[in-house]
Image (cartoon, helix red, strand yellow):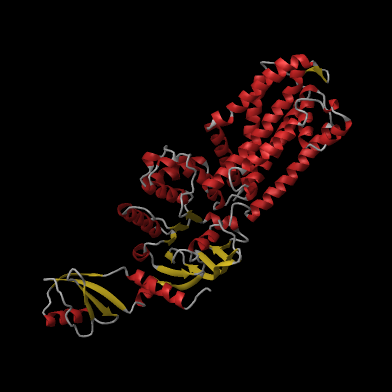
């Protein structure tokens, strides 16, 4: 396939993915908006007003970057894992496997679809947050870079999960038992400075802590960790997961007999 | 000469079970080829490997000269696949399924729409283009898979049981469509359980059993292997006892029809001569069964008795 044909194939996958999650918007776009609005009301307005300031900002302002990032992480992951697994389940993945689309383009297409949903939901949550607080932007390029890289990373994670999954239960295990705890313990609702020294050390091995803090730095200009280290870590994980996904695709793991 | 499909020493093992045991097969360009065999013989595994849905254990596959190990993308560009089971997204519209497939082959959306429109018209699905695929009847779903497989204009079309569960009228119209495709130059390979389908459509036939090719020859040569052909005669008056006809085995069925075995090479005129001598008037005659079916059963049974592929 020449470059133009590759681009057409990539665009076809991306458009198909965007069409899928927008067609079922009550399942994909509305629930995170409702959940995050509840977080803003309960943790931000009701409880947050009694907590006072966190790292020099009112509590609502402090949690907004974390909640936006949480939406991006869960939705980029969920989009790819559910879409690709349902293609496996319905065997419509065979449409792609018989076609000449290279594995790298298949992966890039699905990841782009996941990024589109992650960022789309992130934008909805950001707009909703404006009803509760005023957002300041400390470093726009850093903010955008962090959110895009994070969405790419978790889309890759969702893709690998979908390749490994053999039943629908398998696509909810990682989000429920890995992503949700790591996100909640990743500094979305608190600064790790509040934790005892031991738990601060434990928190430092949580990769989501770095993503949340890099994004928070982009908005508020504060971070518990080194922002450049965060970006390097996210990038390194992207390279690692891309390699794993491509090797699995090449071997036909979970998709070829 | 470049074959449309060339398979050599193809092997596939599933967890210690040998599904393909060194398959060699060549399909010429422009051929209408049937791959026949009982359930579990290795037909779908062979076609699965050709269409990249199954990983091979050993061997080589070339599609129009392109090796799937070294030129997979080029090989796939020539290939269209209609699988045995429905494998499209049940929630997508008919037109979207076909146009999306074209996109996977790098065909821009404008051209993809033109190709899809033409195929949906030809296959009688135009009225259903905006209907979610799950709403289609079984026959329409089969035609949708054919439209999807042809949208990038492949030179080799593989159909795995294309008319399974399709009514006779639709089956005949699909035969007509495939014959027209073949006349226009598309090489067609099909597997089918309807042996009259293979006999009606195909020029060359391979019979596979237990992962081995038992026969790979022209339909004509295959049918020549039949030593006897059985005819059913409808006598003027139903007979209770079979007449003695010199040189022919004759039986009487419950309805008073005659079943006559005519040895290969024996002129059929001699049968009528003997009937005249016996004073039997015949109103009509027909062949008893599908000839290919008889041969197929004989070959597979013989392979089982000799323990082929064990």
Q: Is residue A196 left or right of residue A149?
A: right
**Residue A145 on image: x %, y %:** 74, 32
**Residue A7 on image: x %, y %:** 60, 43
Q: Is residue B33 left or right of residue A157?
A: left
What residue is drawn where x is 47% and y is 70%? Answer: B209
Q: Nearer the viewer, residue A39 or B29?
A: A39
Q: Residue furthest bottom?
A: B246
Q: Nearer the viewer, residue A91 or B61?
A: A91
**Residue B175 on image: x %, y %:** 35, 57
**Residue B259 on image: x %, y %:** 23, 74
Q: Residue furthest top?
A: A49
Quick check: B16 above or below A96?
Answer: below
What residue is drawn where x is 53% and y is 32%? Answer: A24
The image quadrant of residue B305 is bottom left
Quick check: A152 above or below B206?
Answer: above
What residue is drawn where x is 34% and y is 55%? Answer: B171
> How many badges with numbers are in the image?
0
Q: Residue furthest right?
A: A197
Do we see residue B111 in this rendering? no
What residue is drawn where x is 38% and y is 45%? Answer: B137
Quick check: B154 above or below B277?
Answer: above
Do we see residue B112 in this rendering? yes
For the C terminus of chain A, give its image quadrant: bottom right
């Amino acid at each position: 396939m020449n470059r133009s044909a590759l681009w057409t194939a990539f665009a076809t996958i991306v458009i198909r993915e965007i069409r899928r999650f927008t067609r079922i918007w009550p399942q994909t776009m509305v629930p995170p908006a409702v959940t995050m609005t509840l977080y803003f009301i309960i943790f931000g307005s009701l409880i947050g007003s009694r907590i006072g300031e966190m790292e020099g900002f009112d509590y609502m302002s402090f949690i907004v970057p974390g909640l936006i990032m949480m939406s991006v992480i869960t939705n980029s992951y969920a989009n790819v894992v559910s879409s690709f697994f349902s293609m496996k389940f319905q065997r419509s993945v065979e449409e792609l496997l018989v076609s000449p689309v290279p594995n790298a383009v298949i992966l890039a297409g699905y990841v782009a679809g996941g990024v589109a949903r992650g960022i789309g939901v992130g934008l909805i949550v950001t707009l909703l947050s404006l009803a509760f607080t005023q957002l300041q932007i400390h470093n726009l390029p850093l903010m955008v870079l962090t959110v895009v890289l994070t969405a790419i990373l978790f889309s890759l994670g969702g893709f690998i999960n979908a390749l490994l999954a053999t039943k629908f239960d398998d696509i909810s295990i990682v989000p429920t038992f890995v992503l949700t705890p790591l996100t909640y313990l990743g500094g979305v609702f608190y600064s790790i400075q509040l934790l005892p020294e031991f738990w601060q050390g434990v928190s430092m091995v949580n990769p989501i802590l770095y993503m949340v803090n890099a994004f928070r730095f982009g908005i508020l200009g504060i971070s518990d960790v080194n922002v450049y280290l965060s970006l390097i870590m996210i990038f390194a994980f992207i390279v690692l997961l891309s390699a794993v996904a491509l090797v699995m695709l090449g071997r036909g793991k979970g998709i070829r007999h | 000469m470049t074959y449309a499909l060339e398979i050599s020493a193809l092997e596939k093992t599933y967890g210690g079970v040998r599904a393909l045991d060194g398959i060699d097969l060549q399909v010429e360009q422009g051929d209408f080829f049937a791959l026949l065999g009982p359930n579990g013989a290795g037909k779908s595994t062979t076609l699965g490997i050709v269409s990249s849905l199954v990983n091979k254990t050993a061997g080589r596959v070339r599609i129009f000269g392109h090796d799937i190990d070294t030129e997979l993308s080029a090989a796939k560009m020539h290939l269209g696949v209609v699988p045995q089971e429905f494998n499209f997204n049940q929630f997508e519209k008919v037109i979207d399924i076909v146009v999306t497939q074209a996109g996977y082959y790098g065909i821009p959306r404008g051209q993809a729409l033109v190709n899809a429109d033409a195929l949906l018209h030809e296959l009688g699905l135009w009225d259903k283009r905006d209907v979610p695929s799950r709403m289609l009847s079984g026959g329409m779903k089969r035609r949708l898979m054919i439209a999807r497989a042809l949208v990038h204009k492949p030179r080799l079309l593989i159909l795995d049981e294309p008319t399974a569960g399709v009514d006779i009228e639709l089956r005949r119209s699909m035969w007509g469509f495939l014959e027209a495709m073949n006349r226009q130059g598309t090489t067609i390979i099909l597997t089918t359980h309807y042996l009259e389908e293979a006999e009606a459509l195909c020029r060359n036939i391979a019979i596979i059993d237990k992962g081995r090719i038992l026969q790979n020859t022209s339909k004509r040569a295959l049918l020549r292997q039949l030593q006897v052909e059985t005819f059913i005669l409808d006598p003027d008056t139903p007979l209770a006892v079979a007449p003695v006809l010199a040189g022919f085995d004759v039986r009487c069925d419950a309805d008073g029809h005659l079943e006559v075995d005519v040895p290969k090479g024996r002129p059929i005129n001699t049968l009528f001569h003997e009937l005249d001598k016996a004073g039997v008037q015949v109103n009509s005659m027909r062949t008893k069964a599908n000839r290919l079916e008889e041969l197929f059963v004989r070959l597979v049974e013989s392979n089982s008795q000799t323990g082929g592929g064990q």
